[in-house]
Image (cartoon, rainbow, N blue to C red):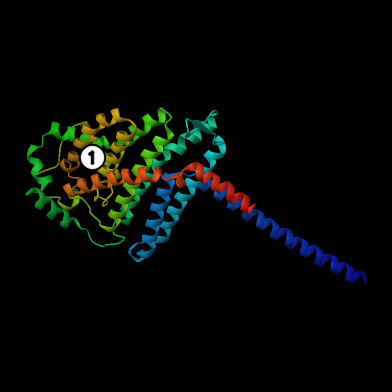
Amino acid sequence: MIAWRDGALQAGESITGVAATEQKRQNLGALARRELAAAWAACGIFECVAFGYLGVSSALILLFAENLAHPVRLIGVQALVAAVILVLCRTEARVSGREWVSEGAGKTGKSVCSTVMQKLFHFWRHWYPHLYFLFCFEELGRLAHLVQPGWQDTKLIAFDHWLTGVHPTVWLERFATPGRNDLMQFVYLTYFIYLLAVGGVLYYRRDWRGYWSVMTYSAVGYAIGYVIAICFPIESPWFSMAGAWHGELRGGAATSFINFIEHYGRVRGAAFPSEHVAGAVAATWGAWRHRRWLFWVMLPLVACMCVSTIWGRYHYVADVFAGMITGTLGYVIGAWLMGRRLLRPEERRLRAVAFEESTG
């Protein structure tokens, strides 16, 4: 009788332990779902575009995995990037408390930051897109032959010759002097400041909705260009037409600096469309919409930069036209996305709250 009772007690304790473990697992699952919902609610339209591109490129990697040496590693890196973005958005929202200030009839999206920690996460939350763009562009070097094994430069060389009657990069060599080369290389380098300049002005003025609008224009334009570059690999005149010129372009400090960058950071491939042009055009459209005076400052520089991409032998004329188109598409589609009510951050938070209540 005593033995039976002890066995029953042990069985009861075992059942209780299993139930406790199961309850703990359910609690952890519910917590994970709530955190994921909160992280998604903290994301904006820019993140939707960023995750969309990562999803498309991951799908292409899976479809054409036999053309890559380490497809699983690439997908893992992309998943890690997506996870870092989610954690950053969630952490910034939690640290800042995400207090939304009403202005007029609607919300402006201006969050209140009072502590050092809030300001730090607020800064990284807004400026990480530049690192994301850099990651995606550098990754294209590994994805250049994901879909097609060979370069397609002969098609663009033929197009440029049909359009202009000459090979533009070769024809421009007759005008090259050290001074002109250095000027063109300097103008080419201005690409790196356009999005920083527009974003910096909007950030300084605390126009967060305008800031994220410009980042979204750029993200859409870049994403379109990245997918085209993966499917249609172009290596650029720098490689495909090497030997067609009488010599290298010589200049001063700007030329030396850009040669240093090209030597250590050049991506072979991803030349069509020109991401330099696409990014500059998207940022310029952003200036037109949000800071008109900055648009007029940028416009002549961007026009000269487009010429410098051909002068410096980095792109074909077709690359420049395609960059203009994708940058403009980025602006048009990005503006449309920013205007969609269901994708606004306020709506995401309301949906996240409803999700938490339904699961919790």
Taking the spot 54% from the left edge, 48% from the top edge, the residue there is: 351
Q: Nearer the viewer, residue 249 or 295?
A: 295
Q: Position of residue 308 (x, y in %)?
A: 18, 39
Q: Position of residue 25 (x, y in %)?
A: 66, 57
The answer to whether one can see residue 70 in this image is no
Left or right: where 304 falls relative to 7: left
Taking the spot 31% from the left edge, 34% from the top edge, the residue there is: 287
Q: Nearer the viewer, residue 339 or 151?
A: 339
Residue matched to label 1: 259
Q: Position of residue 334 (x, y in %)?
A: 36, 44
Question: Which residue lies most toward the front here?
Answer: 105
Question: Which residue lies most toward the right here?
Answer: 1
Taking the spot 50% from the left edge, 36% from the top edge, the residue there is: 121
- What SS does tag 1 mark? helix
- Tell me which corner region of the image, top left, top right, bottom left or bottom right, holds residue 73: bottom left
- Labels in figure, total: 1
Q: Residues within 10 Å of mark 1 (few under 14, many from 20)?
A: some
The answer to whether one can see residue 205 in this image is yes
Q: Given the image, on which type of amino acid does mark 1 rest?
A: Asn
Q: Nearer the viewer, residue 243 or 233?
A: 233
Left or right: where 154 falls relative to 80: left
Left or right: where 97 falls relative to 122: right
Q: Quadrant of the N terminus?
A: bottom right
Q: Position of residue 106 (x, y in %)?
A: 47, 35
